[in-house]
Image (cartoon, rainbow, N blue to C red):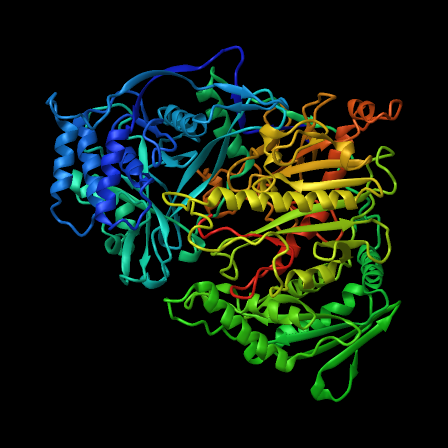
Amino acid sequence: MYPTIRSAAYEPDPLHGPWQEDLRVLRLGEELRAELVRMRAGADGGRSRVDRLPVRRLNFLLQAVAPGVIATGRNAAVDGRPPWLYAREAVPAEVLAPVIGTWAASLSPDCDEDDETADLEERLLTQDPAVPALLPRWESERVDLTETLTSAGGTAEPAARLYGLLPEWLAFRLAARPFRTGGATLHFRVESSGNEARLVSWPPQRYEHRKRTWYYSACLGITVHTVPFADRFRVHVSTHVRRWATRLDVPPHRFSGSTVLLDTPLPWPEGPDRGYRLTANTLGHDRRRKELVWRRHSSVPLLPELDIVRRYPEPADLFAHPERWINGCGDVAAGIVHHPAIGPHAVGSGLMPRERADLDAWVEEGLAPMLRRVPDLTRVTRRNTPSLLPRSGVKSAPGVREARLTLLRRAALARALEGRPLEVEIHWQSPQTRAALLSELPGLIGFPPGTRVGPESDDTWRWQGEGVEILVRARPAGAVADALKVSRDRRRPKGLRFAEAVEERCGAVAERTAPPCDAVGVVIAEIAGKERFTAVPDSDPKHALRVAWARRGWLSQFVNLADDSDTAMEHRARWTWLDAFRQLGAISPPAHRVGAGIPGDLQYAALWLVRHTRKGPTRHPVHRLVAVRVRPGGGPGAIEGWDAERAEWVSYPKLLLLLAETREAAGGPTVPDGPGAAGAVGDAGGPDRTGVDQRRRQEIERQIRTLLFQLRDRPTLLLVDSVNLRQCWPRLRNGSLGHDVLGFGTEPDQRLASYGNDLRVVCLRDANGRGEVAEWYAHDGRGKVGFAEGVWGSGETESRVFASTAATPHTAAKLPKGLMKLVPTAAGRTAPGKTAWNPGQLEITVLGCLSEKALAEAGREGGTPDRPAEWATLTHQLRHHDDYPPLSRPLPLHLARLAGEYVLPLAGTGTARGTAPGPREGE
């Protein structure tokens, strides 16, 4: 058992002091910005916003061709005064002027020879004092790369510009040093991606498998983050495998898009950082033009205008010959980043702990002495799991654990049904699925084989006993499982066309499905996987069927269509039933093993915000707060959800059906859904966006306060996902947090006791695709590394932030912890083909508890104060359940998040009950 875990995170070293660098800074300038805005307005006839420039493509172009450019600043699209470019040394006007001119010409693609563009370039280069200079002068600025501000709650936050600038600077610093491992040397290039800088090993590694060559690279992501109540900000470094596509198993018209990294020499040979950067572009199919094109903010189409010597890849040629381009055509190379939709890849994803530890040590050496590694975390308890049933082993008879589990499931099902029968309709497409579902059910709840009811043609089965009655009808799915028939009339909004198709399917379902009669109803439907419906957009019937059956009073669970080679049908049938039980509320957390510091009558509450944009499952935007309450050992109604419209707690299955209602008026304020309602993030947006966001936040915060009042009757642990909620509850951002207080809107923080004398609040956060929580590995201090399960902390008594790590699930392949994929050893030549799975780290922040200070402020001196580590341990134990591998979140939060699958608003029918106004597309 490992005693410590190590995070791949770094912080400013106080022994070094401020890290200051002399940089060259360029501001876009109001004069040049005004001229570019004027040119753009003339090019597109005034259709675009006049106060915003699409500078992202220009930024990418500058990073591709301008030597020494480290990073681009924020807000240059709307304001010419803040810093726009950061560089090690000034980029000559002879370089900048053609780049800006070429980009300006792209704003008017219909003009082959734009006199205005030529005039612009001439004015940028002019040295005539009589002509107003458009191109601003470079300025020298001493930048503190560790500049920090400390919030009122004690959280250190970096200066805003460091989120984009520092990762770039660190990436170039690391790229200047090779990584040596296993007798080989890897060199890295820098890829810019917003506030993340990536290091990609280049040229790619090769893996020979089945007479083909597969290409892959090591990839490190560098991001800047904060940690609640930490006195220094953090730099997180993640590691993974970047796979390259050299055979595309999709036709061009189904190629939705993929990132392409371009390796090209700088058109101007002078300057620092030469050869250290790969530029990101996007290749995809354009439906209107019916051809492959460079999409979004790709800089490749503009490069030939600046460099007439070299040949750059054309979209169709790159798609047809990806392996030729990744090996280089002349001195230009391009790699298509692999995605599973493109086809299979022989190289597995992920790296094992030994290799990640070696890369981590290389990073640590490269960042010293300005940054140091954050201290290792140690165990805070050995009670890692709740009272789970013991695994079958040598000391226990085979099957004992499963027998006890069946009793627990049956008892939970009886409590959830509250004496009502359970009706299940199985809509099958393959006989294997029907047989597996009927075979697995009795085994899960300890019943004998079912009894056939009625004639054989009805295919109806009954189970009864121990307070549980189940009636199962199996029948072919028929046309209800077919693809939706969505109108192809693109003159009408997608949301309306999809809603019409849903209504048509609802009518078909209503004709063959009656509401359950004095019973709880669940439909299990076998449908094709979503990949089968990619040929026709929005034709997947899953969401339409969920809405249709919910309107008839039926819960729904789906299982993918089986095929002849499906060897895991029994396993999939088992999980289908378990998820159906979850929807019925027939699940509860096992008893904890934390200790006497946890109140015996404690209840759990969890909040989850469902956020759909116009690209969501029903092509209609919505924000909906879902609240779930769990009362362990509470008998019937142990799992409930909050009905905001009726202001009452309802059973979990009823909550799901209520969430699916889409024809009710919004519970929040009415907000216009037009061009001025909200804007898109990026290079365009609407002027009324701020007002929409504010009203949405106010409504969500009002609902949260109402819920807190409803939880005052007994001790409560409130679980929230900070990343999920902070958009509509901004005071959950790290810089706004404080010990034992809650804040809403612009009001002052209030003591936790104001919302309940026995309320505790825990905030959770995972990496969420942005590296907000650092990667980790366990070590013993003597060179051995691996994984470890448990709750970890800094060892400080007053610490409020902890880490939760889970064991590797039994479904993950057992691989040696020392497996080397980047440079395989002679004994591990097939190592690149292995998929390495690494458990994530869940950050637990005990935001509010009954600390000694909180008790005193509430007039409860003399009471026993809480130990934050115990509440972190309880939260960790809630991730475990006998029927599941370790959950990514505590069970109550898991239930709230999955309830969001029923939030399916339809355009033209009003938004879902109790919702807040939704965002515009692109949010």
Closest to the observer, 824 or 847: 847
Residue 190: % across, % down: 36, 33
**Which is nearer the eye, 858 or 208?**
858
**Above or below, comparing residue 491 to residue 775 in the picture:** below
Left or right of 14: which side holds 651?
A: right
Say above or below: 783 vs 917.
Answer: above
Instruction: Determine whether, in the image, residue 627 is placed left or right of residue 368.
Output: right
Q: Position of residue 832 (x, y in %)?
A: 46, 44
- 59, 683: nearer the viewer: 683
**Residue 469 at x, y = what percent?**
83, 72
- Quarter of the picture containing the N terminus is top right
- Residue drawn at x 44%, y 31% as measured from the top left: 182
369 is higher (above) or lower (below) than 107: above
Residue name at image x 14 percent, y 40 percent: 116
Quadrant in the picture for residue 758: top right
Q: Residue at x 35, y 53 (%)?
A: 212
Whether residue 107 is visible here, answered yes or no, is: no
